[in-house]
Image: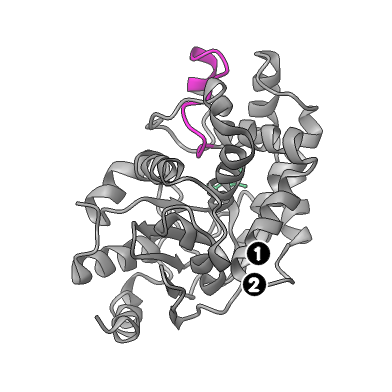
Amino acid sequence: MDIQNLLDDIVGAVQPHVGQGNVADYIPQLAAVDPHQFGISVATRDGEVFSAGDAHVEFSIQSISKVFALALVLAFDGDGIWKRVFREPSGNPFNSLIQLESENGIPRNPFINAGAIVVSDRLLSVTGSAAMAVRDLLRRETGNATLEADQRVAGSELANSHRNASLAHFLASCGNLENPVDLVLESYVNQCALAMTCEDLALATRFLAANGVGAEGTRLLSPAQTKRINAVMLTCGTYDAAGEFAYRVGLPGKSGVGGGIVAVVPNKCAISVWSPGLGRSGNSVAGVAALDEFTTRTGWSVF
Ligand code: GLN
């Protein structure tokens, strides 16, 4: 398989989709990003990296951070988190309030906002700073010591975070937060504001394609924990479009409203794509098209 050639081809093939959809505008800093960009990177299990298009441009990883936060909580704290968050697809938008009330403050899964806020809360309790813990994991996995949250994005989201504040207050009212709402929100927003390139993101996701073994052979998760995270990504990682994503791409994946998506081919490679235009459910239009193209052409899917 000539991966570099394939990625170069995909850049050409997805051009009609680049710029389609809408950039996230409820976070004003993200609304300012040029939608006519597309990048793709693959990091193989053995550490080889291939990139094409705008794979070296930094973007806001947003909800992709939820995967790394969950991995850290499982690594540090084991299965206790599953008493506070379910692992079923929600079928609702990522920031929906509706289910949370009818299900008594237990979020449907760790990848919708309510669930990720619970995970960040636990990570905050266990490490003292969820955003720093995620940042340090990403620095270690990428070898990029300058990886940092974009404070303009964090500030912009925090100043417009009524929806997430509602979710967090509701969680607190149900006894499902351990830390003060303001602290948890700040942590959550800062982990979402981490800025990365496609290439860094593929490297950072590689441990999920390597049975839980990270950079330099360090074990981050057991093979069973890795399997479970990948399973939750497959069923819940792209929100109320998870069925469509499984149909088109056929891999565990996690998207963010910055336009990034990571996907995992177990035992083979991690793929990251980025293009800021989002479809109705908040997933990158050109990003999904590129992953569809990738798995269709390689046959590398879990199905
Ligand atoms: N920070 C964003 C939010 O909470 C993340 C959402 C996303 O990427 N889907 O709304």
Q: Does residue 94 belong to the magenta stretch?
A: no
Front residue (pair 237, 95): 237
Point out residue 78 in the picture as x, y percentages from the top left corner.
Answer: 57, 33
CB of mark 1 near ligand 1 (< 8 Å): no
Circle 2 residues within 10 Å: few <14, some 14–19, many ≥20: some
Q: Residues within 10 Å of mark 1 (few under 14, many from 20)?
A: some
Task: Tell me whether the residue at label 1 lies in contact with that at label 2, contact meaning CB atoms closer than 8 angstroms.
Answer: yes
Quadrant assignment, res 129: top right
Q: CA distance from mark 1 to mark 2?
A: 5 Å
Frontmost residue, 37 versus 274: 274
| Viewer-closest of 164 and 264 | 264
Total residue callouts: 2
Residue type, numbered disc 2:
Gly
Residue 273 marker: none
Q: Which mark is residue 140?
A: 1
Magenta span covers which residues? 99-112
Residue at position x 28%, y 69% in the image: 294
Residue 5 against residue 294 in the figure, above or below: below
Return the x and y of residue 63 as percentages of the image width and height: 55, 49
Secondary structure, magenta segment, majority class: loop
**Mark on residue 143?**
2
**Left or right for 184, reference 109:** right
From the viewer's side, name the closer residue of 252 and 207.
207
User: Which SS class for mark 2?
Assistant: loop
| Above/below status of 267 relative to 27 | below
Task: Note whether 200 is above or below 191 in the view shown.
Answer: below
Where is residue 299? Give x, y as percent: 19, 65
In the image, the residue with mark 2 has its CB under 8 Å from the nearest atom of ligand 1 = no
Quarter residue 261 falls in: bottom left
Above or below for 3 versus 117: below
- Whether residue 259 appears in this view of the structure is no
Identified at 51% across, 31% down, the residue is 96
